[in-house]
Image (tube, rainbow, N blue to C red):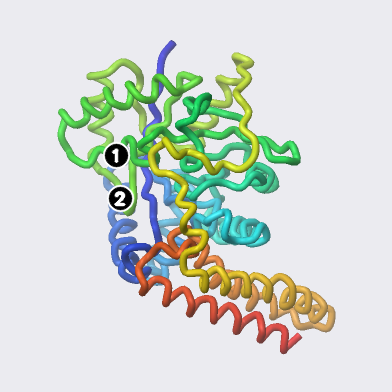
Amino acid sequence: MSLTYHFVSHTHWDREWYKTFETFRLDLVDLIEALLNLMRSNPRYKYFTLDGQTIILEDYLEIMPGRTQDLRHFIEKGSIFIGPWYVLPDEFLVSAESTVRNLLMGQRVASRFGAAMSVGYLPDSFGHIAMMPAILRGFEMDAAIVYRGFGGEPGQEKSEYRWRSPDGSEVLMIHLPPNGYGDAYLGKNDPQVFREKCRSLKAILDTRATTPHRLCMNGGDHHFPEPYLPEALRVMNDACAGQFIHSNLLNYIENVKTFLQERDIRLQTVEGELRQGYRYAFVVQSGVYSSRMYLKQANHTCEKWLVRYAEPLAIWASLAGRANLFAMLQQGWKWLLQNHPHDSICGCSIDAVHREMMTRFEKCRQIARGVVDKA
């Protein structure tokens, strides 16, 4: 049986963390400029995933608005993959409504450029809520990529599972290996590195995969695309058994699903919250649930004002012709959602990041209260 190693090029973009948003955005502009130049100049470099969050497009185009058509071209072509999220959220510190609005906003932004990637991409969340499969199914997604919160316990050694919500909704769950979303990052243009990488990937992935298809995540935190990847894959194909290809998450998942269906393979079912993984790579950082509690309190206040007060009153006001209130509410949700990535709402970033978060919370509150007053 021929084995295929799907190299999925990507960046994991923490919008703010050990640097502020604007400091990281300087690097983001350079990254997307390099990506667009690479795809224009080298057709052998086929695919890149922008971390499953569409806010990256907004952050970049605020600085480089003239690149809108370039981005749209490669997104519509199926070379650059965006969404489905607006931001990659923490799942335990925000409300269920916020999680749904995150996907709604992500798909709304993606629709301006093409279509959102139909994969529940959750590569670094600090664990996962039990209802996530049901939420993803509600957005017509039948597969998820996860990492933290699972693995290391007996019976958790494979890459492929069925993940079931309490309501019975199921998705195909792809669990990343111990090195997570950076296991296939090369880091150096060196044939010896390429040969060593293909051997190390085979040693880990061949023991985990249920199908002939292996997911190799070619990226990492704030990593730029590696322009030498096509040559690296050529070297790997010469050095190691199997087929090493430049691929994408949709192609990989479709191949996995097809093999499982053709062979009628029944995967192990995983149910409930995923908050384990204490012996598996990066653990769930549960200590962040109580760090900088003022952030959690401000978030709850904003969610309450938007969902309980502003939106119901805006609906009533719309019956009297004040439809413009909904545009302002969308902006309020954007300010709130920008505080929901795990490094933000978890309170585990530098002080300057969390000072900026409080400004966003205040802007959200101002909009929500303003809508209530106008309604």
Amino acid type at circle 1 is Tyr
Q: Quadrant of residue 79?
A: top left
Q: Amino acid at mark 2?
A: His
Name the residue nearer the viewer: 40 or 364: 364
* Comes first in the chain, label 1 or label 2: 1
Against 214, residue 332 (above or below) is below
Q: CA distance from mark 1 to mark 2?
A: 9 Å
Give coordinates of residue 323: x percent, y percent: 74, 78
Tell me the quarter of the image containing the C terminus. bottom right
Q: Nearer the viewer, residue 184 or 132?
A: 132
Q: Which residue is mark 2?
A: 223
Position above or below: 245 against 96: above
Q: Which residue is mark 1?
A: 185
- The residue depicted at 42 percent of the width and 46 percent of the height is 49
Q: Residue at x 50, y 25 (%)?
A: 154
Q: Is residue 343 left or right of residue 120?
A: left
Residue at left offset 63%, top offset 37%: 142
Question: Is the Cβ of the residue at disc 1 closer than 8 Å to that at disc 2?
Answer: yes
Location of the N terminus by quadrant is top left
Instruction: Classify mark 2: residues with Cα within 10 Å, few (<14), some (14-19) or many (20+).
Output: some
Decide which of 333, 65 is in the foreground and name it. Answer: 333
Return the x and y of residue 241 as percentages of the image width and height. 31, 15
Image location (x, y in percent) of residue 152: 45, 31
